[in-house]
Amino acid sequence: PEVINGRTHKATVVDLSPWVEYEFRVVASNSVGIGEPSRPSALLKTKAAVPVVAPTNIGGGGGSRSELVITWEPVSEELQNGEGFGYIVMFRPLGSTTWTKAVVASVESSKYVYRNESITPLSPFEVKVGVYNNEGEGTLSSISVIYSGEDEPQMAPAGASALSVSAAAVEVSWLPIPWNRHTGRVLGYEVRGW
Protein backbone atom coordinates (compact mmCIF):
# COMPACT_ATOMS: atom_id res chain seq x y z
CA PRO A 1 0.00 0.00 0.00
CA GLU A 2 1.21 3.52 -0.73
CA VAL A 3 -0.15 4.95 2.53
CA ILE A 4 -0.40 2.98 5.79
CA ASN A 5 -2.00 4.43 8.91
CA GLY A 6 0.52 5.30 11.64
CA ARG A 7 -1.21 2.96 14.09
CA THR A 8 -0.83 -0.02 11.74
CA HIS A 9 2.10 -2.34 12.25
CA LYS A 10 1.43 -4.88 9.53
CA ALA A 11 0.81 -4.75 5.75
CA THR A 12 0.21 -7.25 2.97
CA VAL A 13 2.37 -6.74 -0.10
CA VAL A 14 0.65 -7.95 -3.27
CA ASP A 15 1.47 -8.47 -6.97
CA LEU A 16 4.82 -10.13 -6.27
CA SER A 17 6.29 -12.64 -8.67
CA PRO A 18 6.14 -16.33 -7.71
CA TRP A 19 9.31 -18.16 -6.64
CA VAL A 20 11.40 -14.99 -6.28
CA GLU A 21 13.42 -13.94 -3.24
CA TYR A 22 12.46 -10.57 -1.75
CA GLU A 23 13.62 -8.48 1.16
CA PHE A 24 11.65 -5.61 2.64
CA ARG A 25 12.28 -2.31 4.40
CA VAL A 26 9.90 -0.06 6.27
CA VAL A 27 10.10 3.74 6.14
CA ALA A 28 8.27 6.08 8.55
CA SER A 29 6.89 9.36 7.27
CA ASN A 30 5.02 12.37 8.64
CA SER A 31 4.14 15.86 7.50
CA VAL A 32 7.79 16.92 7.77
CA GLY A 33 9.26 14.17 5.57
CA ILE A 34 10.47 10.64 5.30
CA GLY A 35 12.80 9.05 7.87
CA GLU A 36 15.58 6.52 7.45
CA PRO A 37 14.58 3.05 6.20
CA SER A 38 14.71 0.06 8.52
CA ARG A 39 17.30 -2.66 8.08
CA PRO A 40 16.29 -5.10 5.35
CA SER A 41 14.25 -8.09 6.42
CA ALA A 42 15.57 -11.58 5.96
CA LEU A 43 15.28 -12.90 2.41
CA LEU A 44 11.92 -14.51 1.79
CA LYS A 45 11.03 -16.52 -1.29
CA THR A 46 7.44 -16.45 -2.53
CA LYS A 47 5.71 -19.75 -3.20
CA ALA A 48 5.98 -21.46 -6.58
CA ALA A 49 3.15 -21.26 -9.12
CA VAL A 50 2.33 -22.62 -12.56
CA PRO A 51 4.30 -20.64 -15.19
CA VAL A 52 2.19 -18.17 -17.16
CA VAL A 53 4.65 -16.82 -19.75
CA ALA A 54 4.99 -18.87 -22.93
CA PRO A 55 8.16 -18.98 -25.04
CA THR A 56 8.40 -16.43 -27.85
CA ASN A 57 9.90 -16.36 -31.36
CA ILE A 58 8.69 -19.84 -32.27
CA GLY A 59 10.41 -20.86 -35.48
CA GLY A 60 12.60 -23.50 -36.98
CA GLY A 61 12.62 -25.33 -40.25
CA GLY A 62 15.65 -26.46 -42.15
CA GLY A 63 17.48 -29.44 -40.79
CA SER A 64 18.16 -32.67 -42.61
CA ARG A 65 15.84 -34.91 -44.58
CA SER A 66 13.08 -36.43 -42.42
CA GLU A 67 13.58 -33.83 -39.65
CA LEU A 68 11.38 -31.16 -38.18
CA VAL A 69 13.46 -28.55 -36.32
CA ILE A 70 11.57 -26.38 -33.81
CA THR A 71 13.20 -23.41 -32.05
CA TRP A 72 12.09 -20.82 -29.47
CA GLU A 73 13.38 -18.05 -27.22
CA PRO A 74 13.92 -19.52 -23.72
CA VAL A 75 11.92 -18.18 -20.79
CA SER A 76 14.03 -16.18 -18.32
CA GLU A 77 14.59 -17.57 -14.82
CA GLU A 78 12.46 -14.95 -13.07
CA LEU A 79 9.43 -16.05 -15.14
CA GLN A 80 9.81 -19.81 -14.56
CA ASN A 81 7.79 -19.58 -11.32
CA GLY A 82 9.20 -22.74 -9.72
CA GLU A 83 11.49 -25.74 -9.81
CA GLY A 84 11.33 -28.50 -12.39
CA PHE A 85 10.90 -26.05 -15.28
CA GLY A 86 10.83 -27.32 -18.87
CA TYR A 87 9.14 -26.99 -22.24
CA ILE A 88 6.24 -28.77 -23.92
CA VAL A 89 6.55 -28.94 -27.71
CA MET A 90 3.42 -29.71 -29.73
CA PHE A 91 3.25 -30.14 -33.49
CA ARG A 92 1.05 -31.59 -36.22
CA PRO A 93 1.05 -31.66 -40.03
CA LEU A 94 -0.88 -28.68 -41.40
CA GLY A 95 -4.51 -29.74 -41.76
CA SER A 96 -4.28 -32.56 -39.21
CA THR A 97 -6.32 -32.61 -36.01
CA THR A 98 -3.97 -34.73 -33.88
CA TRP A 99 -1.08 -33.09 -32.01
CA THR A 100 2.19 -34.87 -31.24
CA LYS A 101 3.57 -33.83 -27.85
CA ALA A 102 7.18 -33.91 -26.63
CA VAL A 103 8.66 -32.79 -23.30
CA VAL A 104 12.02 -31.00 -23.17
CA ALA A 105 13.19 -31.08 -19.55
CA SER A 106 16.20 -28.77 -19.89
CA VAL A 107 15.72 -25.18 -18.69
CA GLU A 108 18.34 -23.87 -21.15
CA SER A 109 16.88 -25.63 -24.20
CA SER A 110 15.78 -23.58 -27.16
CA LYS A 111 15.50 -26.30 -29.80
CA TYR A 112 13.77 -29.63 -30.43
CA VAL A 113 14.41 -31.91 -33.40
CA TYR A 114 11.81 -34.51 -34.37
CA ARG A 115 13.09 -37.26 -36.69
CA ASN A 116 10.78 -39.56 -38.63
CA GLU A 117 11.38 -41.22 -42.00
CA SER A 118 7.73 -40.64 -42.96
CA ILE A 119 8.17 -36.83 -43.03
CA THR A 120 8.24 -35.64 -46.62
CA PRO A 121 10.59 -32.77 -47.51
CA LEU A 122 9.31 -29.24 -46.97
CA SER A 123 6.06 -30.34 -45.32
CA PRO A 124 4.27 -27.59 -43.37
CA PHE A 125 3.64 -28.21 -39.66
CA GLU A 126 1.69 -26.25 -37.07
CA VAL A 127 3.80 -25.81 -33.94
CA LYS A 128 3.24 -24.42 -30.45
CA VAL A 129 5.57 -24.46 -27.44
CA GLY A 130 4.46 -24.30 -23.82
CA VAL A 131 6.00 -24.39 -20.37
CA TYR A 132 5.66 -26.44 -17.19
CA ASN A 133 7.18 -26.77 -13.74
CA ASN A 134 6.54 -28.91 -10.65
CA GLU A 135 3.28 -27.01 -10.07
CA GLY A 136 1.80 -27.99 -13.46
CA GLU A 137 1.54 -27.08 -17.13
CA GLY A 138 1.41 -23.41 -18.05
CA THR A 139 0.70 -21.31 -21.10
CA LEU A 140 1.20 -22.37 -24.73
CA SER A 141 2.48 -20.03 -27.43
CA SER A 142 0.34 -19.15 -30.40
CA ILE A 143 0.59 -21.48 -33.41
CA SER A 144 3.44 -20.99 -35.90
CA VAL A 145 3.84 -22.78 -39.23
CA ILE A 146 7.28 -24.20 -40.02
CA TYR A 147 8.55 -26.61 -42.68
CA SER A 148 10.35 -29.91 -42.37
CA GLY A 149 13.87 -30.31 -43.72
CA GLU A 150 14.57 -30.35 -47.43
CA ASP A 151 15.90 -33.19 -49.54
CA GLU A 152 18.71 -32.84 -52.05
CA PRO A 153 17.54 -31.69 -55.50
CA GLN A 154 15.96 -34.60 -57.38
CA MET A 155 16.49 -33.21 -60.89
CA ALA A 156 19.41 -31.88 -62.88
CA PRO A 157 19.40 -28.43 -64.47
CA ALA A 158 18.26 -28.59 -68.10
CA GLY A 159 19.51 -26.86 -71.23
CA ALA A 160 23.20 -26.77 -70.39
CA SER A 161 25.23 -25.09 -73.12
CA ALA A 162 28.75 -23.72 -73.48
CA LEU A 163 30.07 -20.84 -75.54
CA SER A 164 33.76 -20.14 -76.08
CA VAL A 165 34.47 -16.51 -75.25
CA SER A 166 38.29 -16.51 -75.43
CA ALA A 167 41.29 -18.81 -75.68
CA ALA A 168 41.08 -19.44 -71.90
CA ALA A 169 37.38 -18.95 -71.00
CA VAL A 170 34.08 -20.63 -71.72
CA GLU A 171 30.68 -19.28 -70.69
CA VAL A 172 28.36 -22.03 -69.41
CA SER A 173 24.61 -21.45 -69.09
CA TRP A 174 21.62 -23.60 -68.03
CA LEU A 175 17.95 -23.33 -67.12
CA PRO A 176 17.40 -22.99 -63.38
CA ILE A 177 15.60 -25.68 -61.44
CA PRO A 178 12.18 -24.26 -60.51
CA TRP A 179 11.27 -24.17 -56.83
CA ASN A 180 8.64 -26.68 -55.86
CA ARG A 181 7.63 -28.69 -52.85
CA HIS A 182 9.94 -31.58 -53.73
CA THR A 183 13.15 -29.81 -54.74
CA GLY A 184 13.06 -26.97 -52.21
CA ARG A 185 15.31 -23.97 -52.50
CA VAL A 186 18.31 -24.31 -54.77
CA LEU A 187 21.12 -22.51 -52.96
CA GLY A 188 23.69 -22.90 -55.68
CA TYR A 189 25.01 -24.82 -58.65
CA GLU A 190 28.28 -26.57 -59.31
CA VAL A 191 29.77 -26.42 -62.80
CA ARG A 192 32.05 -29.29 -63.76
CA GLY A 193 34.24 -29.47 -66.84
CA TRP A 194 36.52 -32.12 -68.31
Image (spheres, rainbow, N blue to C red):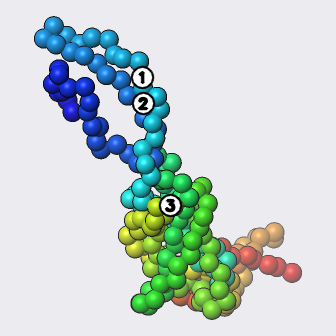
Is the N terminus in the top left, top right, bottom left or bottom right quadrant?
top left
Q: Measuring from the top left, give residue 182's x and y in whole percent.
A: 58, 89
> Eyeballing the image, is 92 above or below 77?
below
Residue placed farthest to the right in the image?
Answer: 194
The count of marks equals 3
Name the kind of residue labelled 3 in the image: Asn
Using the numbered discs, state the Cα–Cα distance from disc 3 to disc 2 in whole angstroms.
24 Å
Closer to the chain start, of discs 1 and 2, is: 2
- In front: 149, or 23? 23
Name the kind of residue labelled 2 in the image: Glu
In which quarter of the view is residue 112 placed? bottom right
Using the numbered discs, state the Cα–Cα distance from disc 1 to disc 3 in whole angstroms.
30 Å
- SS at mark 3? strand
- Badge 2: residue crowd in 10 Å (few <14, some 14–19, many ≥20): few
Q: Measuring from the top left, give residue 86's x and y in whole percent.
A: 55, 62
Q: Which residue is mark 1?
A: 40
- Left or right? Give the position of 160 relative to 8: right
Q: Which mark is residue 23?
A: 2
Q: Residue at x 60, y 55 (%)?
A: 108
Q: Which residue is mark 3?
A: 133
- SS at mark 1? loop
- In front: 119, or 150? 119
